[in-house]
Amino acid sequence: MFTLLFAGCALKSRDIGADLSNIRVNQVGYLSKGVKQAIIPTPEIDSFYVEDKKGKVYFEGSILPTKYWDKSDEHVAVADFSTLSDKGSFRVVSGTKTSPFFEINDQPYLELLKGAAKSYFYNRASSTLDRKYSGDYHRSYSHPDTAVYVHASAASVLRPEGTKISSSFGWYDAGDYNKYVVNSGITLYTLLLAYEQNTALFDTLTWNIPESENDQADLMDEIMWNVKWMEQMQDPEDGGVYHKTTTVAFEAFVPASEATGKRYVVAKSTAATLDFASIMSKLSVIIRDRDPKYAQSILDKAELAWRWAEEHPNVTFKNPVSHSDVPAVSTGEYGDSELRDEFFWAASELYLATMKKYYEERIELNVFENFRTPSWPDVESLALISIASTNQPINDKLKKAAADKLMSLSEKLTQQWVNAPYKITLNDFVWGSNAVILNQAMILTNAYRFFGNKEFYDAALSGLDYVLGRNATDYCFVTGFGTLSPKNIHHRQSASDEVAEPVPGFLVGGPNPRNVHQDCGSKRYRYKQPARCYLDETCSYSTNEVAINWNAPLVYLTSTLQTIYQNDFE
């Protein structure tokens, strides 16, 4: 997701700040029997009401005490209307301030879920996007990747430099046209978890992809598109996994079919190999009843990958530099020098897939002083989720220990949510901050599933409200949804087609005060406060790029909140 090649910034976006005095809400909608809160900046009075489009008032209440938030330099108050359960279209009014209209019903996220999931279809490599399935976003066949070159950094005796191999299928990673195993790791895990925990929901949903008529859920069809690419990234001779399929430098902002630079598979890495082992193990468990032969095949590949990683425990990836006639590589690095979390995750998934004592003995929960919110370089908490949520007959002590770690992390996040002026768990705005809050919500929902603490569910729900508009920028951060959403995303397909609207269903990275001087230039960012530092311009890869690992927790959270709501609260 580190795409730098763009000349200049288009000056056509709706810059934030046009009217940041209005009331911030989840612009998509609220669950009928769920927590419903709005944020009122600099309130004029201490009361508010909720009305429908005809002006009929359905709820009246008092705002909570005003608090100052240094992340946005605002004094804000919460308006809580959770007890309003009527279905329909409403808005919040307080003094002269109003919110956009939003929906209240029992399935407010359904279209959003389908849109977020279909974003992966639009990012397919080795594919035509036929108008039947993609409408105005149709495109020609792009990146067959049936004959990519083995880079010198990836060369072996049986596959010397320049050997052509197939690396077809897969998803474009982010705003660029390359494919990265490490980022696919956390992406596929999150989507697989979404399907595993919400099977009944996904088995009823389709979103118009070529496979929609088959007997498999659309989400699993989409997952398999990327899995087929990942399988080709493993060297069958030794089990090691190439780090990425890439051009040596980022392609220009041209349509995918015109991005025809020479493509390579680049060096094997321990992180990529362990991520591969984790995903193939997880997938084998999910499909073993449906397709036992294939499940065993990919589990064998996972174990082969583990053996390579044990023999090569510290092969950290760095972009190759040029020497002789070998080109340097400058695309997304996804380098990771700390690998104990990848070993922990892979051992956990292999244990759950094989029930072998060998892998169980390599699951050491006490190695980590603190478990972190999942991200592509920090995957130890994914193992906690898998262990705590498994239906396998594993050691009760191990399962409880993993659940307790989830509980501890969730309690910290919930305390942040309780005290935050915006009622969110996020307090540090980094690259992809929108995905951070959604991954925090994934931790919370899994702790809720295990322990049943309602506040964990409510805190997770609040994270979704945040990315859908109840934030300091006034944006719903998903393209094509809400009243105000990003128009000029850092995404080569969207920037190079002739369609005014961007490809729908993509979550942008969100507020991030770091690196802004490198993309559009810091002067283009109207607000410097961390929670407001966002720019809806194509050049803003720091805040307005999209990425497969950012969309995955959006798919997970919308499906999981819906399933839990139907099972526990409706």
Image (cartoon, grey):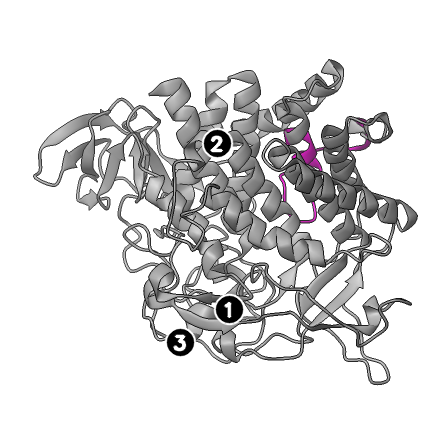
Residue 77 magenta-highlighted: no
Q: Does the magenta stretch mainly form a helix, a strand or a loop?
A: loop
In the figure, residue 131 lies in which quadrant?
A: bottom left
- Residue occupied by mark 1: 522
Where residue 129 sits, quadrant-wise, is bottom left
Quick check: 442 left or right of 84?
A: right
Q: Residue at x 70, y 48 (%)?
A: 377
* Nearer to us in this view, 240 or 130: 130
Report the magenta residues as a range: 366-385
Classify residue 29 as left or right of residue 233. left
Q: Is residue 99 at least partly visible in the picture?
A: yes
Q: Are marks 3 and 2 in contact (CB under 8 Å)?
A: no
Residue 103 at x, y = what percent? 24, 38
Write the residue at 58% across / 79% down. Answer: 260
Indicate whether 515 appears above or below 69.
below
* Circle 3 Cα neighbour tier, 10 Å, few/some/many (<14 / 14–19 / ≥20): few
Q: Position of residue 441 (x, y in %)?
A: 51, 35
Question: Residue 302's x, y, as percent?
Answer: 76, 43
Q: CA distance from mark 3 to mark 1?
A: 15 Å
Residue located at (76% from left, 39% from top): 346
Report the residue marked by disc 3: 10
Is residue 25 left or right of 488 when viewed as pictured?
left
**Which residue bears the numbered disc 2?**
198
Of callouts 3 and 1, the N-terminal one: 3
Q: Is residue 367 magenta?
A: yes
